[in-house]
Amino acid sequence: MNVRRLIPTAAVAGISALGLLTVSACSGAGAADGKSGDKLDVVASFYPMQYLAETIGGKHVDVQTLTKPGVEPHDLEISPQQTGMLGESDVVLYLKGLQPAVDEAVEQSGAKHPVDAAELTSLEKHGPGDGHDHGEEGHEGEADHGDDEDADADAHEGEEHDHDHGDENAADPHVWLDPVKYGEIAEGVGKALGKADPDNASYYEKNAEKLTDRLGTLDQEFKDGLKNTRTKTFITTHTAFSYLAERYGLEQVGIAGVDPESEPSPARMKELQKIAREDKVSTIFFETLASDRTAKTLASDTGLKTDVLDPIEGINDQSRGDDYFGVMRANLSALEKSLGAK
């Protein structure tokens, strides 16, 4: 395949006391803003941030979420009341670059302790295109590159999985779908909550450590489940799985780009049919928060099946799990079945 290396951005891993979370010296040893004994009021931008806040904050936080269940996070509009809520909260946990309306509202609100999850791990740019060059070499031996980090990076050159909200140079924000990167964010959130609420800092850090351990176990489950498969290619309506694909040596192909409900051109449909045939793809994936029409049309034209690959942007009645871990394991099961895990 024709490939190029993914481009890492100069994202900052860890917590910066000056840039990420500014805590007033006058807060002293008490809880945030002098509210000793009170719970931290945390506002989370969407479900993956909500899950971190609730799991790590536990009994010491009250969490409100801007994106309600069933709402597509990228389409969220912020009301003046919600902007005011951001300004009144103790901590705002969000992921800059995913929801422009949230980014703007956080800036306008004068939030006391904004925590940008994008600064707690490293982000990458994932370019357009699907990385296939069927006119040259075939795909024999593709499965061998899953354990080679350089090969993993190279194998995704040009994949059509950039959800950049209109900016080709923007970093891909879908980091929570990589358990390792999500664990890095969890560790940073634990430290951030501890800075906002020093009395309970050890509690937050212990919860963060427990969560990162669970994410490490999940990472190993994905490695074991996907290390030996019939094919490494999967086709999806929502190109949100670049980090996951890179982590486990897979190749993501988007139907029509970054919008899960956009219609592919006839030429693109023919190209996808060729990819499906040559890469032995069995399933076209769609997500629960968007229409499945395009996926079912392509599947019908190619004689393939459809299934859900959930980007976990929200949990609702259609989700195949009650929380992040439940849905991620459902995603693993769907990938194992689709890719022909042995």
Image (cartoon, helix red, strand yellow):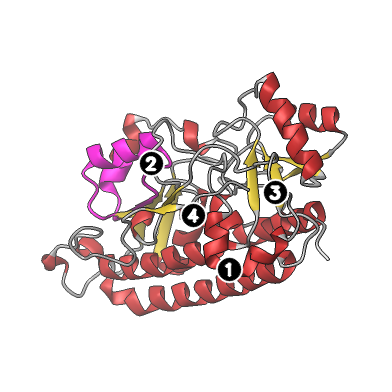
Does residue 269 lie above or below 309 as drawn? above
Residue 87, image x and y in percent?
A: 26, 44
Along the line of sight, which residue is nearer the eye, 310 or 129?
Answer: 129
- The mark lying in front, picked from 2 and 1, is 1
Q: Residue at x 19, y 63 (%)?
A: 23
Q: Quadrant of the C terminus?
A: bottom right
| Precedes in sequence: disc 3 or disc 4 | 3
Residue position marked by numbered label 1 in the rendering: 148
Amino acid tagged 3: Glu
Quadrant in which residue 160 is drawn: top right
Residue position marked by numbered label 2 in the rendering: 170
Which label is found at residue 175? 4
Numbered range of the magenta stretch: 85-114
Does residue 32 lie above or below 252 as drawn? below
- The mark lying in front, picked from 3 and 4, is 3
Amino acid tagged 1: Asp
Does the image show residue 294?
no
Are the residues at dot 2 and dot 4 in contact (C-beta closer than 8 Å)? no
| Precedes in sequence: disc 2 or disc 4 | 2
Residue position marked by numbered label 3 in the rendering: 137
Along the line of sight, which residue is nearer the eye, 190 or 16?
Answer: 16
In-image side of 30 versus 238 (left or right) = left
Where disc 3 sits, the SS reads loop
| Precedes in sequence: disc 2 or disc 1 | 1
Question: Within 10 Å of the Cα at label 4, are there few (<14), some (14-19), or many (20+) other Cα atoms?
Answer: many
Where disc 2 sits, the SS reads loop
C-alpha span from label 4 to label 1: 20 Å
Does residue 327 lie above or below 46 as drawn? below
